[in-house]
């Protein structure tokens, strides 16, 4: 018996046996060195070596590759078996004990092929004890029993289970323990003699305890779109970086717009060159309609001076204000996925009036405004949210300079833009590549008389030519002189902008702003604490009182003494023709001061000059001999407006900020510019960041407009000169080309100083030091200006927080015998009136026009600010809301004596529906009985012939009544 090991636990025992039929190889397999009981799992197969490996693979279901490694050993076993067979045949007659005790000496393994097999006789038969039944022998009969699945298909003759006969007779003649021991010892001796022991395989290294899979450190959720395009400022407020791209009016069917993808960079360059891209930093609570208005103003005030058409007709007049804006928002179609033609499209997005800028980034709008590549632009300043808008009406004109020719008016914006859309739609437009194919040719500026009547008038722009003649290379000379610090600091011109914080000097008059009556406190300070000489302004109407105040200021300018103008005792009185007093008080004073300011503001071409950002500066001339042609009265009037808490709306706040701090340009901090000049702030920052070696071509329009300099002449500057030129870019667009030392500018600041006999003045020192009074305001001058300009009424939303609507109780209404319909909501009636625009009954309004004062700006009657602004004007004397004082709108019953103290006027006013405005009390008294009368009437109204006449609806009747009452009260000084 020959034993060899395979793997660690598999033992294969091969035993040869000589039978009368054919030699066989018996293979016994067991695991873990534990023999199988009763040898039930062994198999006898003919000893044919080519058959051994496939047989073992089939029997034990192992891979052939596992048994191929045993082929060499099995070959040697086969050769040895043949020798053993031959040896046992020769010594068959020898005694069994001799065969067992004389082992055959080991012989080398032959390398020749195995000889032919002779009949096999088992050597074990000689060692067995005699048995009465005899020992079983193998026969040549072939059993049909196939113990191994699949062996029937091997195609060879296999003997039956050769152990069946031996096992069946073994129960009767069991071997003793000594016999089995001797047999096993003989087997071991045979193995040791013929096959030296082989070294077992080295034990495998056992696997240790399983280690957990390494993981990356946990990260938070990715930033949202809102967090990507926004930042939180020092005050904890979130601000969004928004870049508005304005597309021309669409010429495609359905009003869709092509979203340029292949030519996106070319389109962006076109939009930038035509001033159609504007970047803003706005609060997340800014409304989308305000963002649209900001973009519209930027287009109108920019170098191209865009002029937009408007919708006409009765239907357009009934639209809400935010539905008639010059621009509308575009959203992605199908999430920006291209259609079958490979083109993506944009479509008009209906913008609700309460939609905020942060709503663009909301998850519900991600498919429309949140595409990660189409709607977000990455810059050095951070990611910007791209908001696309389009011009609503096709009638749009702009002014452009072509090839050095004098600027001409064009109406070919859509045609020019058609070159930059995708190829799939290029066939819809002109195919020519020549300049004539993409431009209207333009017309001179003087040809404005032939423009479409629907087009608004040309807005004044900083690019308009004016009498100031500035040499072309003047700015270059000033730049070359910039490094000399002595000339820089003479008027506070910094060599580098925004590099150091600005720290203003505090003012000494804090107690003035803490006084209960601010104007009286200023007057006492100007008059050394005395009552002073009273200022008396009288007249029979508003115009005569405006003339009286203007003459008083003119005398103060000639004397260079404003002590009486700032007197704590000021009497503004409206008189009857017979000299009796009709009205007086602070409301009358406020209305007269504002009317005097409006007399200048309504003629800006004479008294003001357009500046950057849509603001105006003080008009000046070059000739020193003509400086007195422009009245200096307007400068003290501007200061009186500020003292009364009213904003001179067309004048730039930067003019006052510059004067308050002694003409120091450092006072125009980066925060101040972002608030009042966002576009200019971005331009200057871009200039400083670009440096002298960068591409300066995008600044060509700015320098040609404001500095009269070609950009090519600025390409040779060094770093110091380039940075210093930023101060010129800031000063000239806001204040003009002349320095503060110019005679005209000195005259301007002298008029704003308002000197008094005791030395008190707004500067408190000298011309170029400071406005000490306004620097004493709590929070500084920037907060003072922000609060003053915030008092302007832009729409009803800016009025509503300060409006107190007083309604009588249901019991009082029933007691007054007024049949007010239960469905009428009095506050809602007033709010609805303020939210609408236009003229409700044109025919009736024409009849009322002669009673309207010329100071009322009827040209803005379609603006959303007109109705709220005129109401505030009639109720307070000026179209400004004081943040600390509210306005009352009282629905008065017939029994309310506060409506009118005169019983005769009281009854007549109630019957006619007259709204009584009390500017001193900042209130309006609305007769409730007339409102009920309008609700109970039938509409449309009928004439004596039964024809429908105005008003056609209840809404028209209410709007016509209240609008007529408001506009006819302005300028009438109807304080009773």
Image: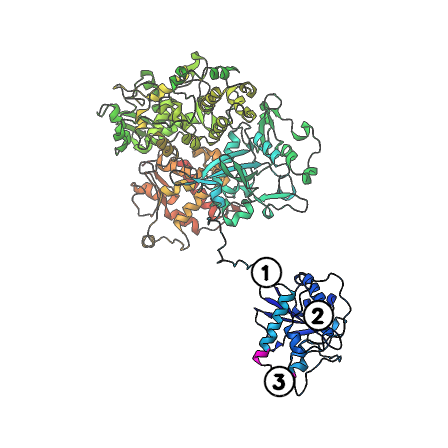
Q: How many residues crowd around disc 3 within 10 Å: few (fewer than 14), some, or many (20 or more)?
A: few
For marks 1 and 2, give the CA distance. 25 Å
Q: Which x, y percent locates residue 927?
A: 36, 45
Quadrant where the N terminus sits is: bottom right
**In the picture provided, is 455 more to the left or to the right than 659?**
right
Name which of mark 2 and mark 3 comes first in the sequence: 2
For marks 2 and 3, give the CA distance. 28 Å
Label annotation for residue 953? none
Which residue in the rendered view is the most extreme toward the right? 116
Above or below for 768 versus 641:
above
> Which residue occupies 46% across, 19% down?
737
**In the picture provided, is 501 more to the left or to the right than 169?**
left
**In the picture provided, is 794 more to the left or to the right than 187?**
left
Tag nearer the camera, 2 or 3: 2
Residue in the foreground of this view, choosing between 81 and 368: 81
Name which of mark 1 and mark 2 comes first in the sequence: 2
Q: Which x, y percent locates residue 41?
A: 63, 74
For marks 1 and 3, give the CA distance. 39 Å
* Residue 197 visible in the displayed image: yes
**Where are the magenta residues, as a range?**
168-179
Q: Which x, y percent locates residue 861?
A: 47, 37
Residue in the foreground of this view, choosing between 121 and 595: 121
Q: Secondary structure at mark 1?
A: loop
Q: How many residues crowd around disc 1 within 10 Å: few (fewer than 14), some, or many (20 or more)?
A: few
Label annotation for residue 199? 1
Quadrant where the C terminus sits is: top left
Let me know if residue 169 is in the magenta part.
yes
Image quarter for residue 907? top left
Question: What residue is shown with label 3?
Answer: 173
Question: What residue is shown with label 2?
Answer: 84
**In the picture provided, is 273 more to the left or to the right than 737?**
right
Check the image and tell me how it is coloured.
rainbow
């Amino acid at each position: 018996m020959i034993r060899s090991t395979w793997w660690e636990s598999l033992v294969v025992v091969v035993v040869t046996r000589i039978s009368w039929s054919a030699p066989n190889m018996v293979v016994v397999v067991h695991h873990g060195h534990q023999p199988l009981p009763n040898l039930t799992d062994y198999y006898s197969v003919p000893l044919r070596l080519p058959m051994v490996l496939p047989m073992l693979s089939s029997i034990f279901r192992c891979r052939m590759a596992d048994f191929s490694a045993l082929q060499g050993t099995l070959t040697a076993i086969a050769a040895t078996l043949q020798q053993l067979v031959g040896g046992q045949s020769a010594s068959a007659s020898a005694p069994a004990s001799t065969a067992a005790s004389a082992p055959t000496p080991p012989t080398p393994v032959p390398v020749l092929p195995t000889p032919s097999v002779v009949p096999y006789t088992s050597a074990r038969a000689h060692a067995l004890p005699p048995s009465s039944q005899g020992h079983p022998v193998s026969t040549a009969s072939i059993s049909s029993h196939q113990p191994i699945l699949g062996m029937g298909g091997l195609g060879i003759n296999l003997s039956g289970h050769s152990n069946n006969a031996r096992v069946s007779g073994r129960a009767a003649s069991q071997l003793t323990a000594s016999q089995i021991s001797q047999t096993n010892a003989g087997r071991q001796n045979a193995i040791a003699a013929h096959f030296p022991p082989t070294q077992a395989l080295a034990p495998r290294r056992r696997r240790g305890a399983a280690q957990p899979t390494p993981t990356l450190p946990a990260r938070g959720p990715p930033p949202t779109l809102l967090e990507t395009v926004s930042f939180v400022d020092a005050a904890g407020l979130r601000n969004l970086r928004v870049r508005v791209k304005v597309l021309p009016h669409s010429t495609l069917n359905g009003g869709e717009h092509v979203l340029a993808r292949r030519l996106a960079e070319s389109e962006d360059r076109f939009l930038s060159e035509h001033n159609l891209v504007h970047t803003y930093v706005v609060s997340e609570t800014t409304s989308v309609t305000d963002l649209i208005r900001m973009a519209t103003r930027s287009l109108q005030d920019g170098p191209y001076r865009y002029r937009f058409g408007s919708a006409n007709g009765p239907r357009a007049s009934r639209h809400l204000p935010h539905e008639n804006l010059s621009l509308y928002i575009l959203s992605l179609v199908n999430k920006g996925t291209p259609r079958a033609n490979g083109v993506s499209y944009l479509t008009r997005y209906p913008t609700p009036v309460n939609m905020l800028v942060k709503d663009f980034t909301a998850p519900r709008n991600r498919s429309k405004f949140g595409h990660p590549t189409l709607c977000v632009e990455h810059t050095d300043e951070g990611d910007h949210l791209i908001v696309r808008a389009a011009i609503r009406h096709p009638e749009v004109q702009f002014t452009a300079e072509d090839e050095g020719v004098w600027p001409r008016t064009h109406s070919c914006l859509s045609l020019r833009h058609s070159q930059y859309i995708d190829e799939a739609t290029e066939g819809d437009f002109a195919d020519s590549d020549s300049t004539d194919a993409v431009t209207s040719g333009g017309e001179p500026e003087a040809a404005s008389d032939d423009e479409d009547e629907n087009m608004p008038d040309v807005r004044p722009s900083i690019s308009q030519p004016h009498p100031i003649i500035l040499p072309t290379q003047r700015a270059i000379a000033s730049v070359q002189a910039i490094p000399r610090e002595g000339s820089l600091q003479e008027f506070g011109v910094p060599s580098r902008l925004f590099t150091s914080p600005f720290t203003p000097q505090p003012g000494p008059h804090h107690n003035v702003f803490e006084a209960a009556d601010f104007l009286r406190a200023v007057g006492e300070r100007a008059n050394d604490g005395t009552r002073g000489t009273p200022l008396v302004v009288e007249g029979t109407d508003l115009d005569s009182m405006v003339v009286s105040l203007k003459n008083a200021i003119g005398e103060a300018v000639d004397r260079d003494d404003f002590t009486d103008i700032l007197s704590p005792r000021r009497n503004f009185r409206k008189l009857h023709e017979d000299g009796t007093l009709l009205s007086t008080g602070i409301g009358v004073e406020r209305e007269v001061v504002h009317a005097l300011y409006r007399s200048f503001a309504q003629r800006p071409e004479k008294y003001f000059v357009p500046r950057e950002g849509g603001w105006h500066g003080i008009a000046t001339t070059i000739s020193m001999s003509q400086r007195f042609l422009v009245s200096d009265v307007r400068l003290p009037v501007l200061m009186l407006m500020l003292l009364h808490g009213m904003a001179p709306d067309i004048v730039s706040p930067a003019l006052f900020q510059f004067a308050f701090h002694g003409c120091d340009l450092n006072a125009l901090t980066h925060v101040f510019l972002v608030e009042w000049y966002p576009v200019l702030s971005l331009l200057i920052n871009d200039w400083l960041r670009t440096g002298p070696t960068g591409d300066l071509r995008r600044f060509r329009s700015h320098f040609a407009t404001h500095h009269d300099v070609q950009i090519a002449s600025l390409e040779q500057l060094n770093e110091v000169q380039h940075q210093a030129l930023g101060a010129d870019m800031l000063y000239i667009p806001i204040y003009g080309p002349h320095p503060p030392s110019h005679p005209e500018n000195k005259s301007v600041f002298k008029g704003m100083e308002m000197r008094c006999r005791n030395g008190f003045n707004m500067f408190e020192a000298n011309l170029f030091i400071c406005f000490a009074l306004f620097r004493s305001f709590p929070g500084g001058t920037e907060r003072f200006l922000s609060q003053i300009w915030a008092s302007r009424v832009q729409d009803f939303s800016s009025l509503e927080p300060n409006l107190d609507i007083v309604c009588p109780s249901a019991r009082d209404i029933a007691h007054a015998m007024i049949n007010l319909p239960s469905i009428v909501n009095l506050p809602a009636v007033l709010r609805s009136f303020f939210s609408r625009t236009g003229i409700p009954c044109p025919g009736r309004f024409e009849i009322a026009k002669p009673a309207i004062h010329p100071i009322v700006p009827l040209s803005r009657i379609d603006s959303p600010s007109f109705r709220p602004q005129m109401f505030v004007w009639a109720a307070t004397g000026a179209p400004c809301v004081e943040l600390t004082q509210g306005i009352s709108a009282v629905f008065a019953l017939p029994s309310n004596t506060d409506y009118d103290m005169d019983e005769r006027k009281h009854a007549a006013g109630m019957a006619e529906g007259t709204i009584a405005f009390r500017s001193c009390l900042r209130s309006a008294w609305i007769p409730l009985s007339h409102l009920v009368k309008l609700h109970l009437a039938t509409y449309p109204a009928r004439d004596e012939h039964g024809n429908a006449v105005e008003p056609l609806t209840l809404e028209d009747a209410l709007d016509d009544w209240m609008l007529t009452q408001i506009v006819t009260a302005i300028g009438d000084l109807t304080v009773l």
